[in-house]
Image (cartoon, rainbow, N blue to C red):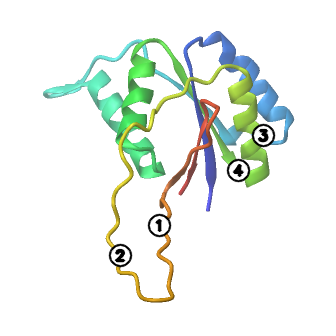
Amino acid sequence: MPKTAVGLFKNPGDVKDVVREVEVIGLPRHEIRTVGEPLNLGLDGVLSIGRIDFEVDLFRELSRMGASRAEAEAYVDGLRRGGVLVFATGPDQKVDRAAEIMNRHGAVETEENTALEPHLHSSVHSGVTAVHEPVQTGRLRQSGGGAAFFVW
């Protein structure tokens, strides 16, 4: 399964340094992608506005990778405000190091988990201890940093 670190940067000037450092750890350039909102989006067809199409496509791609709705919306909103996304895909150790680089360069935290944990109904039989563990599929979040990991 591919693993991808995604970081949102408010300052597009930081992205060149991030990409350069991620390349140094051994991720090939074709596995490091940057996305900023295109500046010259116009009409692409009947009733189709380029900016909306771009944002919808990005939202879908982020969701397909495992981003929560809140994360995907935050990423798209960050691009609207002039930010840039950096994606780094590869082996676990290199992607972990890429996320460290992103966080060191100020990747923006995109999601606050304020919702309550769902209550899972269970039956407890004598001699058996019920165990409730949160389950996440598609994404892995590490506290204390702005970069998020997605495994898809």
- Counting every numbered tag in the picture gives 4
Q: Nearer the viewer, mark 2 or mark 3?
A: 2
Instruction: Name the amino acid, label 2.
Output: Ser
Asked whether disc 2 touches disc 1, contact meaning CB atoms under 8 Å apart, the reply is yes
Identify the mark nearer the N-term, 1 or 4: 4
Asked whether disc 3 touches disc 4, contact meaning CB atoms under 8 Å apart, the reply is no
Q: CA distance from mark 2 to mark 3?
A: 39 Å
**What secondary structure is marked by label 4?**
strand
Q: Choose top left, top right, bottom left or bottom right for residue 118.
A: bottom left
Residue marked by disc 3: 97
Q: Quadrant of the N terminus?
A: bottom right
Residue marked by disc 1: 132
Q: Residue at x 50, y 71 (%)?
A: 131
Instruction: Name the amino acid, label 3.
Output: Arg
Q: Nearer the viewer, residue 10 or 118?
A: 118
Identify the mark nearer the N-term, 2 or 3: 3
Q: Residues within 10 Å of mark 2 (few under 14, many from 20)?
A: few
Residue marked by disc 4: 90
Instruction: Name the amino acid, label 1.
Output: His
**What secondary structure is marked by label 2?**
loop
What's the mark number on residue 61? Answer: none
Identify the mark nearer the N-term, 2 or 1: 2
- Pinpoint residue 50: horizontal percent, then vertical percent: 29, 24
Q: Residue at x 65, y 10 (%)?
A: 13
Q: Nearer the viewer, residue 123 or 59?
A: 123
Residue marked by disc 2: 122
Q: CA distance from mark 2 to mark 4?
A: 38 Å
Identify the mark nearer the N-term, 2 or 4: 4
